[in-house]
Image (tube, rainbow, N blue to C red):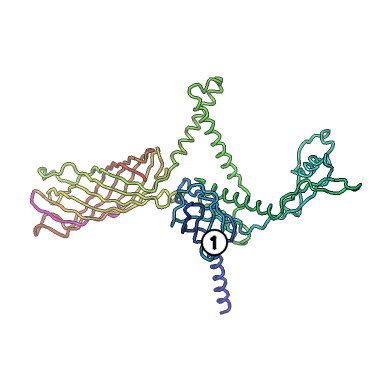
């Protein structure tokens, strides 16, 4: 029982601690002054806000899964009034007033939240006392840590290879320097102040604010990077199973990561070179020799292909609609009833395709589909031709083995399977009989290719094979030639117009 009570108390403490963290993830704008310089948010002391602290107010303008600008800064603010549940902030710098809308949610990046766990810097103080005509030289020597004190003859002894950088060891994180000079007074020398550094408390405050702004800038830059993913970021922060004090992943970059970083930087430089050449117009090659021009043209063609491959994967569209026209390749009618053959069998279908796991390296290749089809076909029964009109729903999925389903200007091949369920009516004109059927196809198979253009419009061609199981539930007369059950095997060539969004 004692262990159970301890466990409950520990869980309650963790819940209380984590509640503050959750509360800082979002805040609602409750009100704003007429001038727009004062704002009221539903964050208070219970949410970890401290009186007088600074903050940056940001807003999510797109989903975090979108490969675009996701979070933007709205304003810089300082808290001026605080209670348990609400706080008043002075917006001393507003980046976009239109983004401040009463009732909407924002993220308050405050000092106490961003600098949580960081200690204040330890600062020391040094007084430089020297002659008035040597103040500048002595101060520069102090600022440079007097690096030439032991190397006055360094010009006669050139460096061959530095073994390591100069190191500094100190108990303080930084030193504030005061400059004083000697002054004669009644035959004695006394120290007089020439320059006084800021008070340690003020300087520490300025340093803290600069650190805070750097953290906010780094956060916005990282989260707005199109290649940034929270799943990948959290995976890199996971702790080791054997020791929770160490991360699974080392802080040092691997050779592969260094290679990827180098290639990315080179791609940016190559793109700048390529665009600079294009800006010069048709005369850009006049300063190159034949060999230089030949080599440069090869590099430009490589850059064009790289840019095209990047563009292919630039935009990810989750949904695609299709308007499909299908032509029957199989024939199920008989020549013994030629006068009542159905000519021009076809199908028309509307379909929606969705990518459930967008931008996942593996799962984005699998999609889900749903559609509604109207089908006009025919079959043979007891040497009579019967016309069959079907209306059915489909549900299934596709797999894209080579390119992602949203890839542009590339042949996107896919394999798919689906089930069909619905109803239909059959008519045998030669004997003047009708019947109604339920329709079930399990499963249907298809294979095809689609091509997406830059304007989100695309074309798709596919071949489908399915077996329709017909089960009669209503007939026009007793002893009808139309069967109680029938199996239709259909092979279709389908042409579709697609639109992605």
Give residue 74's position: percent from left, percent from top.
50, 50
Instruction: Please state if 248 lies on the left or on the right of 62 as rendered.
Output: right
Q: Residue extending furthest front?
A: 186
Reading the image, the residue beneath label 1 is 21
In this rendering, the answer to whether 82 lies above or below 5 is above
Instruction: Please state if 325 lies on the left or on the right of 398 as rendered.
Output: left
**Residue segment shown in magenta:** 430-443
Q: For residue 32: magenta?
A: no
Q: For residue 440: magenta?
A: yes
| Residue 74 visible in image | yes
Task: Name the magenta segment's main secondary structure.
Answer: strand
Give residue 168's position: percent from left, percent from top.
76, 48
Q: Residue extending furthest bottom?
A: 1
**216 vs 384, nearest the viewer:** 216
**Quarter residue 235 falls in:** bottom right
Q: Residue at x 55, y 62 (%)?
A: 82
């Amino acid at each position: 029982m004692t262990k159970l009570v301890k466990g409950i108390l520990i869980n309650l403490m963790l819940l209380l601690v984590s509640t503050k963290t959750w509360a800082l993830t979002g805040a609602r704008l409750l009100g704003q002054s007429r001038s727009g310089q004062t704002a009221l948010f539903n964050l208070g002391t219970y949410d970890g806000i401290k009186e007088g602290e600074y903050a940056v107010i940001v807003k999510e303008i797109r989903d975090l899964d979108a490969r675009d600008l996701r979070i933007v800064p709205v304003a810089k603010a300082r808290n001026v009034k605080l209670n348990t549940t609400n706080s008043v902030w002075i917006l001393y710098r507003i980046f976009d007033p239109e983004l401040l809308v009463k009732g909407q949610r924002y993220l308050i990046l405050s000092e106490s939240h961003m600098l949580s766990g960081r200690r204040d810097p330890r600062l020391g103080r040094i007084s430089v006392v020297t002659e008035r005509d040597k103040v500048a030289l002595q101060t520069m020597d102090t600022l440079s840590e007097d690096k030439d004190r032991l190397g006055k003859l360094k010009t006669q002894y050139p460096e061959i290879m530095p073994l390591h950088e100069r190191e500094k060891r100190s108990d303080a994180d930084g030193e504030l320097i005061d400059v004083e000079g000697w002054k004669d007074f009644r035959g004695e020398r006394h120290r007089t102040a020439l320059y006084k550094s800021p008070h340690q408390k003020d300087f520490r405050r300025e340093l803290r604010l600069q650190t805070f702004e750097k953290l906010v800038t780094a956060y916005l830059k990282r989260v707005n990077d199109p290649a940034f993913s929270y799943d990948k970021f959290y995976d890199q922060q996971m702790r080791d199973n054997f020791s929770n004090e160490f991360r699974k992943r080392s802080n040092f970059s691997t050779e592969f990561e260094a290679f990827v970083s180098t290639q990315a930087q080179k791609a940016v430089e190559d793109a700048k070179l390529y665009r600079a050449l294009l800006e010069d117009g048709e005369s850009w090659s006049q300063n190159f020799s034949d060999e230089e021009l030949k080599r440069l043209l090869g590099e430009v063609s490589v850059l064009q292909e790289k840019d095209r491959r990047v563009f292919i994967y630039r935009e990810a569209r989750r949904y695609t609609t299709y308007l499909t026209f299908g032509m029957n390749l199989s024939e199920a009618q008989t020549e013994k009833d030629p006068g009542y053959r159905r000519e021009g069998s076809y199908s028309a279908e509307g379909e929606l395709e969705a990518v459930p796991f967008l931008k996942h390296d593996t799962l984005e290749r699998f999609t889900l589909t749903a559609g509604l089809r109207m089908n006009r076909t025919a079959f043979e029964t007891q040497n009579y031709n019967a016309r069959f009109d079907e209306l059915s729903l489909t549900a299934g999925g596709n797999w894209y083995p080579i390119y992602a389903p949203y890839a542009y200007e590339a042949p996107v091949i896919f394999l798919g399977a689906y089930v069909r369920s619905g109803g239909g009516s059959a008519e045998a004109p030669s004997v003047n009989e009708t019947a109604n059927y339920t329709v079930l196809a399990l499963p249907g198979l298809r294979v095809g290719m689609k091509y997406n253009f830059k304007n989100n419009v695309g074309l798709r061609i596919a071949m489908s094979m399915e077996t329709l199981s017909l089960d009669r539930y209503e007939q026009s007369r007793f002893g009808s030639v139309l069967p109680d059950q029938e199996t239709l095997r259909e092979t279709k060539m389908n042409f579709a117009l697609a639109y992605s969004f």
